[in-house]
Amino acid sequence: MVAQLQRSQTETTRITPLMIEVIDLKKRFGVQEVLCGVDIAVPAGTTTVILGGSGQGKSVLMKHMIGLEMPDSGEVRINGRNIVGLGGRALNDLRADFGMVFQNAALFDSMNVFDNVAFPLRERTKLSKQQIAAKVRGKLELFSLDASVEKKYPAELSGGMRKRVGLARATILDPKIILYDEPTTGLDPITTDQVDEMIMTAKEKLGITSVVISHDISSAFRIADQICFLYGGRIVEAGPPEVFKRTRHPEVKRFLASWFEEER
Ligand SMILES: Nc1ncnc2c1ncn2[C@@H]1O[C@H](COP(=O)(O)OP(=O)(O)OP(=O)(O)O)[C@@H](O)[C@H]1O
Ligand SMILES: [Mg+2]
């Protein structure tokens, strides 16, 4: 199994350099071992989807990729550079290349929608007020949010709208890497399709590298170059969708079977 995993990963990685590489990552919280040696290789300009049951450590793993959590051991390489142990300033610089869509949208409650989306531009660029306004409006439009929501506060929005505002904010600086923690959970099918389209367009037009945590298997098969399954603190299956579908791992089979049941 491990050999098969390594083979399928080397096959993808031989073609393009790796943007993200997670090597033997281990993390425990107290007595709970959440990550027990995770390996993932994400080639530049591709989309990797991470699947797995609730509580398996997907969000924890993703936070390690951007230095929001530090492991007990192992490495996280971004563009070849190990970020484990980096300090605040270096991490801050690194994060300029990242956009992250958090599972719970994580908007600033005291700021309206416009200010939430404009925040990274004000923090990291010297754009004029007009330029900022134009960018923010363009991005909100991209996610089907019209001008009437600009002045609203997060508490006044539906869950799906908050999610879309979170997506607008994560992509406002046009980052090289975007990490999405369940970007479509709670969205209606049309908006889900739009988010999927956006992830695919970002890859095709801008060469963006994406890592997406998802519960939605049909969307995973649509957008992924590679699907990884996290179970028992390890990636137990990884490969392109068509290979992934033919998994022999019992837990992955069970996961896929429950989805086929639902589809019927
Ligand atoms: N900061 C923390 N301190 C202690 N335990 C934590 C912390 N963060 C996560 N955990 C624990 O680690 C485990 C994995 O959590 P995580 O949020 O990564 O799961 P997940 O796979 O993203 O689940 P879901 O699909 O429900 O979002 C859980 O048992 C969680 O309680
Ligand atoms: Mg999670």
Image: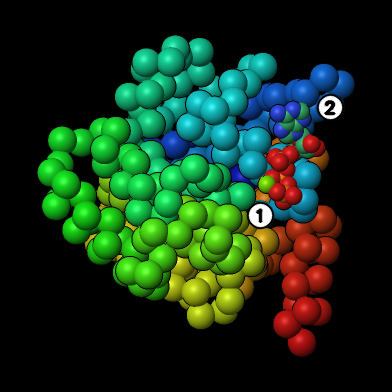
Mark 2, secondary structure of its residue: strand
Q: Where residue 154 appears, x then y in whole percent? A: 52, 54
Vertical placement of residue 236 versus 258, above or below: above
Q: Amino acid at mark 1?
A: Leu
Q: Mark 2: few, some, or many residues within 10 Å (few <14, many ≥20)?
A: few
Q: Where residue 193 appears, x then y in whole percent? A: 49, 75
Vertical placement of residue 149 versus 260, above or below: above
Vertical placement of residue 210 versus 157, above or below: above
Marks 2 and 1, how far apart in space? 20 Å
| In front of the other: 165 or 193 | 165
Q: Residue at x 86, y 21 (%)?
A: 31
Mark 1, secondary structure of its residue: strand
Q: Mark 1: few, some, or many residues within 10 Å (few <14, many ≥20)?
A: many
Of badges 2 and 1, nearer the viewer stands: 2
Q: Residue at x 15, y 35 (%)?
A: 126
The first of marks 2 and 1 along the sequence is 2
Q: Where residue 102 appears, x then y in whole percent? A: 55, 46
The total number of labels drawn is 2
Locate the N terminus and report the quarter of the image it occupies: top right
In the image, taking residue 259 as reference, residue 112 lies left or right, namely left
Which residue is identified by label 2? 32
Vertical placement of residue 32 versus 121, above or below: above
Residue 257 lies in what quarter of the image?
bottom right
Q: Amino acid at mark 2?
A: Gln
| In front of the other: 201 or 79 | 201
In the image, taking residue 85 as reference, residue 159 lies left or right, namely right
Q: Residue at x 32, y 24 (%)?
A: 93
User: CB at mark 2 closer than 8 A to ligand 1?
Assistant: yes
Is residue 62 visible in this depiction of the protein?
A: yes
Which residue is identified by label 1? 51
Q: Where residue 240 appears, x then y in whole percent? A: 53, 60
| In front of the other: 116 or 223 | 116
